[in-house]
Image: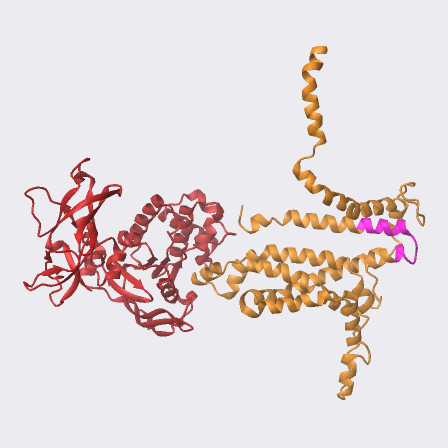
């Protein structure tokens, strides 16, 4: 026994020292890990805790109940309607943005030439102004006797259309707000298409439409899909457009969560809703990312 | 050697009608003329190589022929029809890019069948033709579904070639496709390309900066310099009768001796003392001053009792192995110092080790030619 203990002693000491010493990589990552732990994971853990707390209480981590989820999935609860509206808005936003942003992205890559950087900056510029301020700007533009309506009347015309506080203007607001988030990944995606390949396809007899379908679109797809994913995730969690432009005529899902936390003072219910929505969007995103094999699309595998 | 090939013989008998004709073709970018006043007849079925240093305008010329650029001036005609403004997808020509421009998201088979898909050929016929072309370019059938980016450099060359052939063009253009390939594979592919040219009977126009490549494959070579076509001719003409010093030195290493007409009518050396004989027709009879040019492989060392039309005394101070051949650098006496002459001998005729470095260089009048100074 003594022999064994003696022969093992130095090794154990070395192992201990080794265990105490983190690797260089781990030490470098430590500050970020701590920051993420406190700033990113902690609120999520708190939300998760609240989701299982007694309704209308602040007994987080001290009570456990599934009552909040039961309330959400109760057929009499209309929260699913908000969820459907959010999904509808998000899907429509993505679809419209894909169609609107593609020509601009193509132009930035191929057509605009030296003007391209300036035009890019123009698309980034609105991001420097708070989203709410920009949305109130649109309200002033579309409101009765506002910029559009007032100007048309001053010109002796019939006056502007009454679009404010409708689902349509909410969608418009979302498309407007999230355009850069579709445009820039898409522009990068299109930049990945070597001009040589387009020239070669043309040289082999292909017309514009065929080149677009067979070469440009598939090779730009990684960028386009990332743009779609990004705008979908952003749009499904958007509230400001529905509140400010839509005038709360439609309540979207994140607005429901906000109401639960504020007016209703029912944090556990709001948390449960947040958990369900996060799980759904997160699951959908992970599913999409697993299907979206960038290496294969780029032909690296 | 090349004269015995059937294509060459046919060309010599009756030059076929030009398939592609360039008249006064110019291309300017701003005030810079990349291609200047080019006249060229490309014969049907020939392998024509345009060779020149980087920036000589050969790629610009090719892009105009393929339809990716339009000439600023001049006419390009195909079978007598003006094609200056015909887009590449409407021309019966096809370019193999320097980058090869293979479609990375498509398999080998899909890449090759792409021009057929464009033409609306059905899937079964496309596959059959793709496999047939893969046989022609010596790609194994199992590669049909392989991702093209997983292929090696040489395999990608073959895919690019098969894809171009699938388009069934009348003229095939090549933009230095072998420039990034290692030496041994390059030699193989050069021979295969030459074979393919003979088998298909199509017109090949090839661009390269490597004269060696041009010499191996071409029926005719065009040498470009600063946007101009300096000389067009068979490899023998380019090598044996270059029109100027640029072509002469571009084609290979040379010994040049500056000469002027002596009182006896012979060429007398300006820098290297002595008189030099050059046989007609390239003896520069009409000139008073010239360069006498001798290629290193036409020089030899004269033993005791051996004679040659021209001789020079010199000292060997360096030798390089060129593989099967050896190059000697020989210092000869010249005005104001010494001049270096190059001699290239096959290994069998090399100087024995420890031989006397004092040698007599000799060459015959028929192996030298003159160039205007």
Residue A138 position, x and y percent, is 77, 72
The answer to whether residue B83 is magenta is no
Residue B284 position, x and y percent, is 13, 64
Residue A299 visible, this angle: yes
Quadrant position of the N terminus of chain A in the picture: top right
Seen as rendered, the residue at the extreme bottom is A156
The answer to which image quadrant residue A6 occupies is top right
Towards the viewer: B109 or B370: B370
Residue A112 visible, this angle: no
Residue at screen point 41% across, 54% down: B163
Residue B140 position, x and y percent, is 41, 43
Magenta segment boundaries in residue numbering: A259-276
Shown colour of chain A: orange
Towards the viewer: B18 or B51: B51
Shown colour of chain B: red
Give left or right: position of B150 versus A235.
Answer: left
Seen as rendered, the residue at the extreme front is B336
**Scheme of colours in the image:** by chain
Label the magenta part by its dominant secondary structure: helix
Residue at screen point 76% across, 80% down: A148
């Amino acid at each position: 026994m003594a022999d064994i203990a003696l022969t093992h002693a130095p090794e154990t000491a070395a192992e201990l020292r080794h265990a105490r010493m983190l690797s260089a990589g781990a030490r470098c990552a430590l500050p970020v890990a701590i920051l993420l732990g406190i700033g990113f994971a902690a609120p999520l853990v708190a939300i998760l805790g609240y989701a299982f707390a007694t309704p209308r209480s602040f007994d987080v981590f001290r009570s456990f109940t599934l009552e909040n989820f039961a309330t959400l999935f109760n057929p009499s609860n209309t929260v699913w309607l908000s969820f459907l509206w959010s999904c509808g808005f998000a899907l429509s936003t993505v679809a419209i943005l894909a169609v609107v942003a593609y020509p601009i992205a193509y132009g930035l890559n191929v057509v605009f030439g030296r003007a391209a950087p300036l035009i890019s900056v123009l698309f980034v510029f609105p991001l420097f102004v708070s989203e709410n301020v920009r949305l109130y700007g649109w309200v002033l533009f579309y409101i009765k006797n506002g910029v559009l309506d007032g100007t048309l009347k001053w010109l002796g015309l019939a006056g502007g259309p009454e679009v404010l506080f409708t689902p349509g203007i909410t969608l418009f607001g979302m498309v407007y707000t999230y355009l850069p988030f579709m445009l820039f990944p898409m522009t990068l995606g299109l930049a990945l298409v070597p001009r040589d390949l387009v020239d070669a396809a043309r040289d082999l007899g292909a017309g514009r439409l065929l080149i677009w379908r067979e070469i440009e679109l598939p090779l730009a797809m990684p960028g386009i899909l990332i743009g779609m994913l990004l705008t979908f995730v952003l749009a499904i969690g958007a509230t400001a457009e529905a509140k400010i432009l839509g005038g709360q005529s439609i309540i979207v899902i994140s607005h429901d969560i906000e109401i639960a936390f504020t007016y209703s003072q029912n944090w556990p219910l709001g948390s449960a809703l947040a958990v369900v929505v996060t799980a759904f969007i997160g699951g959908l995103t992970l599913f999409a990312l697993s299907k979206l094999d960038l290496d294969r699309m780029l032909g690296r595998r | 050697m090349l004269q015995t090939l059937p294509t060459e013989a046919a060309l010599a008998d009756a030059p076929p009608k030009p398939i592609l004709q360039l008249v006064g073709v110019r291309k300017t970018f701003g005030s810079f003329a990349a291609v200047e006043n080019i006249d060229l007849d490309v014969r049907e079925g020939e392998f024509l190589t345009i060779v020149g240093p980087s920036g000589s305008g050969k790629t610009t010329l090719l892009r105009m022929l393929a339809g990716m650029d339009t000439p600023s001036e001049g006419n390009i005609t195909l079978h007598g029809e003006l094609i200056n403004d015909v887009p590449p997808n409407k021309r019966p020509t096809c370019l193999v890019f320097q980058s090869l421009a293979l479609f990375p998201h498509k398999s080998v088979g899909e890449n090759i069948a792409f021009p057929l898909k464009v033409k609306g050929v059905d899937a079964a016929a496309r596959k059959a033709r793709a496999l047939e072309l893969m046989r022609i370019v010596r790609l194994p059938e199992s590669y049909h579904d392989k991702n093209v980016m997983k292929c090696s450099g040489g395999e990608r060359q073959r895919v690019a070639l098969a894809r171009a052939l699938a388009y069934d063009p009348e003229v095939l253009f090549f933009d230095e496709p072998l420039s990034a390939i290692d030496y041994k594979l390059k030699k193989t592919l050069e021979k295969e390309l030459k074979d393919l040219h003979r088998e298909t009977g199509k017109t090949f126009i090839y661009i390269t900066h490597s004269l060696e490549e041009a010499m191996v494959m071409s029926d005719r070579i065009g040498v470009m310099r600063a946007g101009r076509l300096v000389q067009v001719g068979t490899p023998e003409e380019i090598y044996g009768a270059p029109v100027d010093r640029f072509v002469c030195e571009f084609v290979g290493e040379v010994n040049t001796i500056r000469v002027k007409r002596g009182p006896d009518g012979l060429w007398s050396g300006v820098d290297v003392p002595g008189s030099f004989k050059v046989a007609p027709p390239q003896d520069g009879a009409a000139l008073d001053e010239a360069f006498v040019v001798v290629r290193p492989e036409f020089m030899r060392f004269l033993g005791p009792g051996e004679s040659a039309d021209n001789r020079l005394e010199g000292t060997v101070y360096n030798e390089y192995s060129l593989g099967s051949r050896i190059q000697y650098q020989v210092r000869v006496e010249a005005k104001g110092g010494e001049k270096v002459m190059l001699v290239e001998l096959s290994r069998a005729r090399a100087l024995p080790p420890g031989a006397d470095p004092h040698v007599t260089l000799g060459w015959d009048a028929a192996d030298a030619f003159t160039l205007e100074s």
